[in-house]
Image: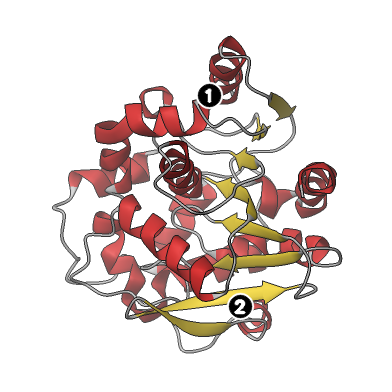
Amino acid sequence: MASTDVPDLVAEWRAKGAPTKVDGHQLFVVEQGPADAPVILLLHGFPGSSFDWRGVASRLAKQWRVLTFDFLGFGLSDKPRDSNYTLFEQADLTEKLLADRDVTRALLVAHDMGDTVAAELLARSNERRSDFDWPGCVVTNGSIFIDMAQLTAGQQALLALPDEPLTESLGAAGLSAGLAASFPPDRPEAAELESMVWLTQHAGGDVLLPRLIRYIEQRRRHQPRWTAGLCDFPGPMVAGWGDLDPIAVPAMADQLGALRTEQNLPVEVIHWPDLGHWPATEDPARVASLVATHASVWL
């Protein structure tokens, strides 16, 4: 169980948001920027939270209404032990959160697991099963083509466990080592890593990791649907990719670019040779600049 002492970085981020009831669950939501401005929606990855977007969100909020939240089971949101945590449910909750805030149009920006939630949202739009208007999408490092993913030892160990909550905590040291393995050797800073570990352990969230990581199995089962969600989306799409990623290898971004190019759909692939799996954490100014450049055109 996480320490009751909240890291300073987490306390600062928590003060910017509030728990919000969405379909019977409390989700931690942060909304920043002018209330009447176009909306940018930021979706986080596994095992992170909206905290990972804080540096990007604060920069974008100078011009746009920026909305981000912790998925169910993550960060400061509810962590029920009886949920299956499907990506379909995470997409449902995303749509309900937006609807509750009268948002019908938003630029999608995603990372890691959030890329696949974005793919599901786009698939629904492609099928005309959604009333939401997505003027564009920016994806960052995530295993959008799961057959190309190079899973870490920690991810493989979690997937090897039964699909049920653990009986005891994994411990901060183990979580810290697992997260650090997904960063380049000189990153992240100690305070950043401590905060990410604390948020993972908050409310016993680390015991849920063997269930939360089943999103990888869901990706395998539904890869054709989510590939189509990304590759058939008629609007513009950008992939910003840290090439030092040991998991979501840069060839994934190139594959996305190639598939969309084959269909004459707008796509831009940007490689960052010095960044890894967590671009928004490693260089929030650069990621914010990428999003802002396209938001200025798309929104």
- Indicate which disc residue 252 carries: 1
Q: Residues within 10 Å of mark 1 (few under 14, many from 20)?
A: many
x%, y% of residue 115?
50, 43
Task: Tell me the quarter of the image containing the N terminus.
Answer: bottom left
Report if residue 230 is visible in the image: yes
Looking at this view, name the residue that lies furthest to the bottom.
Answer: 4
Q: What element does badge 1 sit on?
A: helix
Which of the 4 image quarters holds residue 25?
Answer: bottom left
In the drawing, does residue 134 fall left or right of residue 230?
right
x%, y% of residue 245?
58, 34
Q: Which residue is mark 2?
A: 10
Looking at this view, name the residue that lies furthest to the top.
Answer: 262
Between 163 and 124, the residue placed more toward the observer is 124
x%, y% of residue 211?
24, 57
Against 261, is 191 above or below?
Answer: below
- Indicate which disc residue 68 carries: none
In this figure, which colouring scheme has been used for the structure? secondary structure
Judge depth for marks 1 and 2 and give the one in front.
Answer: 1
Q: Residues within 10 Å of mark 2 (few under 14, many from 20)?
A: some
Report if residue 248 is visible in the image: no
Inspect the image, locate mark 2, and give the three-letter code of the amino acid beneath it.
Val
Against 226, is 116 above or below?
Answer: below
Inspect the image, locate mark 1, and give the three-letter code of the amino acid beneath it.
Met
In the drawing, does residue 106 fall left or right of residue 210?
right
Q: Residue at x 49, y 46 (%)?
A: 118
x%, y% of residue 212?
31, 57
Q: Residue at x 49, y 84 (%)?
A: 19
Q: Residue at x 50, y 32 (%)?
A: 230
Against 151, is 102 above or below?
Answer: below
Q: Residue at x 76, y 53 (%)?
A: 284
